[in-house]
Image (spheres, rainbow, N blue to C red):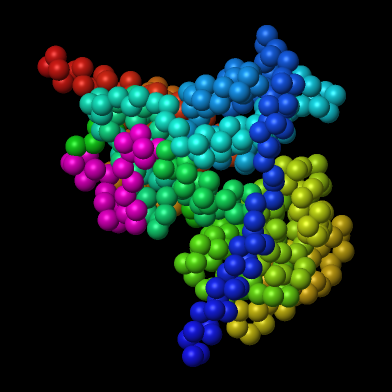
Amino acid sequence: MWMVAFSLISANNLNKMNEEFKEVAESFTLPEAIKEAQRCLHCKVPGCKKGCPISNDIPDWIGELAHGNFGNAIEIIHNRSNLPAVCGRVCAHERQCEGNCVLAKKGEAIHIGKLERFVADFDSEAGWSHENIPEKTRGRVAVIGSGPAGLTIAGDLARQGFHVEIFEMGIEPGGVLTFGIPEYRLPKEVVKREIKKIENLGVKIHLRTTIGQNYTIDRLFEEGFDAIFMGTGTSRPKTLPIEGATHPGVRQAVWFLRRVSLFNSGFIKRDEVVIGEGDKIAVIGCGNTAMDAARSALRMGASEVSVIYHREIDTMSALRAEYDEAVEEGVKFLWNTTVKKVNGAEGMRLHSIIIDQNGEEKEMPVDRVILAVGSAPASRIVDSTEGIEVDDKGYVLTRETPYGMTTRKGVFAGGDVTNRPATVVHAMQDAKKVAESIAKYIDAIKLIEAIS
């Protein structure tokens, strides 16, 4: 009887929590999407396309959408993007396509992100197939990591006739898309749909496979791969030199967000997320990850969440829209404030933190502290491989020609692991350039082999 009751309570709690993490932004209805698409002016020099890191042909697919040609619209989008349903939700539209729309000057920019999301969702729900996939005869590519960069590489090269296999250390593919971006911003079902489309291109995904542990770079080459791409991101969180920061009550934002995702998916219990009902939380940092952590903490039952940032609001790296939504949900912000010391209590709980605001020190009661101050690459692959050089911060060094190749012949890298991108779409932008280089590199070595 006790076990049955426990299961029922756990299921009810999980359902309640899933409701708390329900997607915030609403999609267009069909009439709304058509009406919005018809507002596009189809500028001769489209600022929206110039503002898009992957140069999406925005006016073209919006024009098709305006005429109800949904298949044509998604086909145009797929020419540049493998993850439209993701980009439509989490891209920094206000700084990119929408921010460069000619109508933005009047505060009437086309809602491009919301339209892209609508087209991608409509296409997935309809179950259409638009692509003729070539035979995989051009070469073999191993992709390490299934985040935005890895998925972009895989999709682009599979469409060009390469056999691609992804090696992912996690229990599910997607990287930051699955475990780093909260459900209320990017539902995991959306990520799964996008990944399924890439698998349908002939891409094979190996889960729970850690390169540098289960496999090595050398072994991948021995198994016949012509090129290898490292898209492993930055999985090692940075910390701050704060007294008491090693207390168990201080946690990294990436760790916390991953725990939240695992709980929402039913992989771990509620108490393993650490933050409990009524907790007072301090989040240090003011980027989008900090916003995600703060808003997720509220959804996990925290009674009070304060974001602490050492500078002014105008210098925060978070999107203004993310900040506005955090404020609306009840997150508090302390500007020009630093944490000087963490006072730990017994066990996992904290007692308080000492903060310095405008030169005045005071004590602030908290139960947990979440650090959202960035991350750096893990060294597992580099340490187990000869010839891959990194800089003094651990980021992988790459060449301009061929673009993205590391100091080890045939091994390429892109995305956060090279310290270039900062967002999902910038990782995709970098990966697309690397994909072009990988294709040219393999074609070249195949040609040399054929004539030698």
Toward which corner of the image does residue 94 lie, by quadrant?
Answer: top right
For the point 63% across and 19% down, which residue is it?
Answer: 67
Drawn side of residue 49 relative to residue 234, left or right: right
Q: Residue furthest bottom?
A: 1
In this picture, is 398 found above or below 27? above
Q: Is residue 34 above or below residue 215?
A: above
The answer to whether residue 391 is above or below residue 448 is: below
In the image: residue 186, left or right of residue 106: left
Location of residue 55 in the rendering, given as x and y in whole percent from the top left corner? 57, 22
**What residue is shown at x 69% (from left), y 44% (from top)?**
26
**Residue 346: image x %, image y %?**
63, 85
**Residue 20: image x %, image y %?**
67, 62
- Residue at the left extreme of this rendering: 452
39 relative position to 442: left or right? right
Residue for point 85% across, 24% down:
106
Residue stretch in magenta: 198-223
- Of 104 and 3, which appears nearest the observer? 3
Instruction: Report if residue 212 lies within the magenta region.
Output: yes
Q: Based on the displayed image, in which of its 4 quarters is residue 91 positioned?
A: top right
Nearer to the camera, 306 or 91 = 91
Residue drawn at point x = 49 percent, y = 90 percent: 1
Residue 96 shows up from this direction: no
Res 241 → quadrant: bottom right
Q: Is residue 97 magenta?
A: no
- Residue 242: x and y in percent read 66, 65
For the C terminus, which image quadrant? top left
Q: Which residue occupies the foreground of this view, 224 or 342?
A: 224
Instruction: Say if residue 91 shows up in the picture.
Output: yes
Q: Is residue 227 above or below residue 65?
A: below
Q: Which residue in the rendered view is the most extreme toward the top? A: 44
